[in-house]
DNA sequence: TGCCATAGTATACTTGATGTAACTAAGGAG
DNA sequence: CTCCTTAGTTACATCAAGTATACTATGGCA
C-alpha cells in the first residue's frame, strides 16, 4: 500500500498500517492485560482465529517491534509473546479507541430504533 | 467482517471498522482542516485516489455519520462534504495517531541504519 | 454545433487479506 | 508402537478492497 500521498496524513496512516488488520487489536488487547501469553493461549482467548492467521499477525507485530517473541527450547515447544516497551506506547491509542468504540456501539444501537 | 469475537476487543475493532480503509484517514484529515470541500477539491488534495473509490469511502463515512453531504442543485453540480459533530469526536484519536505515526516513522528510519 | 466542467455510474479486472484443511518435528505417556 | 502435545508450515480457495477505463446528464461558452 502506498500511503505516502502527502506529508501530513501519511503519519496517521503509518499508525493505521501497524494496527489495522482484523485481529491485531484483539491480540494487543490480550497482551496488554496479560503480559506473557503462549501461542495456544492466544488461540484460546481469540475464538475464530486460525493458526495460520495468528502466526502471520504475530510475525507482523513482531517485525514492527510491537511485540516480542521468546522461544524456550523445550519439548513440546514453548513460545511466549509479550508487548515490547515500544508496543506499550500504543496503549493510550488503544484505550481511546476502546472508549470511542464503546460509545459508538451505544450510539449505533440508538440510531437503529 | 465479524469482529464480535468477544466483549472487550470488539469495542476497539468497531472504531477500527470506521477509520480503516486506505483513504478514510486522509479524507478525514483534509475535512478536519478545511471545513467544507467539494468532490473535485478532495480529488485534487488526494493524489492517487480514483473517483469510484473516493465516492465509496465518502458514502461509507456518511453512512457512519462521520461526514455530511450537502447537495446544491446547480449546474454544474455542487456537492460539499464536511465533518459532522459526531465525526469531530474522532479528532483526539486522529491527533494521537498523527503523533504516534510521526514518532514511528522517525524511529523506523533510525532502525534502518 | 461541439466542447467544457462536475459528480458521479458501470463494468471488468487485479491484488491482498483472510480462511480451510492437512501436514510436520520431537519427545513423553500408555 | 501409537497417540498426544506445541507451534507452527504448506497448498489451495475465497472474498473484500482497490484499480482502470469508459460512460452519463446538464447547461454554459464559443
Image: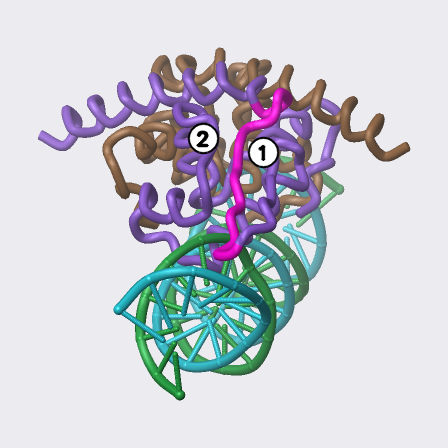
Chain colours: A purple, B brown, C cyan, D green
Asked if residue A20 shows in the view, the reply is: yes
Q: In terms of secondary structure, where does tag 2 sit?
A: helix
Q: Are the residues tagged 2 and 1 within 8 Å (C-beta)?
A: yes
Query: In percent of the image, x 60 and y 26: which residue is there?
Result: A84
The residues colored magenta run: A75-87
**Depth check, front residue: B59 or B6:** B6
Residue placed most toward the observer, A77 or A34:
A77
Chain assignment, label 2: A
Distance in Å between CA atoms under marks 2 and 1: 9 Å
Q: In which chain is the residue bearing label 1? A: A
Question: Does residue B65 belong to the magenta stretch?
Answer: no
Residue A87 placement (x, y as % from top left) = 58, 25
The x and y percentages for residue B66 are: 38, 25
Which residue is the extreme one toward the right?
Answer: B113
Give residue B99's position: percent from left, percent from top: 64, 15
Q: Is residue A6 above or below residue B102?
A: below
- Crowd rating for badge 2 (residues with CA inside 10 Å; few <14, some 14–19, many 20+): some
Mark 1 lies on residue: A67
Q: Is residue A77 magenta?
A: yes
Q: Give whichever of A59, B17 is nearer the camera.
A: A59
Q: Which mark is residue B27?
A: none
Q: Which residue is mark 2?
A: A31
Q: Quadrant of residue A7?
A: top right
* Of callouts 2 and 1, the N-terminal one: 2
Q: Secondary structure at mark 1?
A: strand
Amino acid at each position: 500500500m502506498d500511503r505516502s500521498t502527502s506529508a501530513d496524513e501519511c503519519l496517521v496512516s503509518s499508525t493505521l498500517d501497524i494496527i489495522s488488520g482484523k485481529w491485531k487489536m484483539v491480540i494487543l488487547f490480550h497482551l496488554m492485560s496479560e503480559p506473557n501469553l503462549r501461542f495456544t493461549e492466544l488461540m484460546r482467548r481469540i475464538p475464530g482465529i486460525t493458526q495460520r492467521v495468528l502466526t502471520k499477525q504475530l510475525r507482523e507485530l513482531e517485525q514492527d517491534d510491537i511485540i516480542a517473541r521468546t522461544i524456550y527450547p523445550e519439548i513440546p515447544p514453548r513460545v511466549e509473546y509479550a508487548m515490547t516497551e515500544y508496543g506499550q506506547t500504543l496503549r493510550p491509542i488503544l484505550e481511546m479507541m476502546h472508549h470511542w468504540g464503546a460509545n459508538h456501539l451505544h450510539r449505533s444501537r440508538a440510531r437503529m430504533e
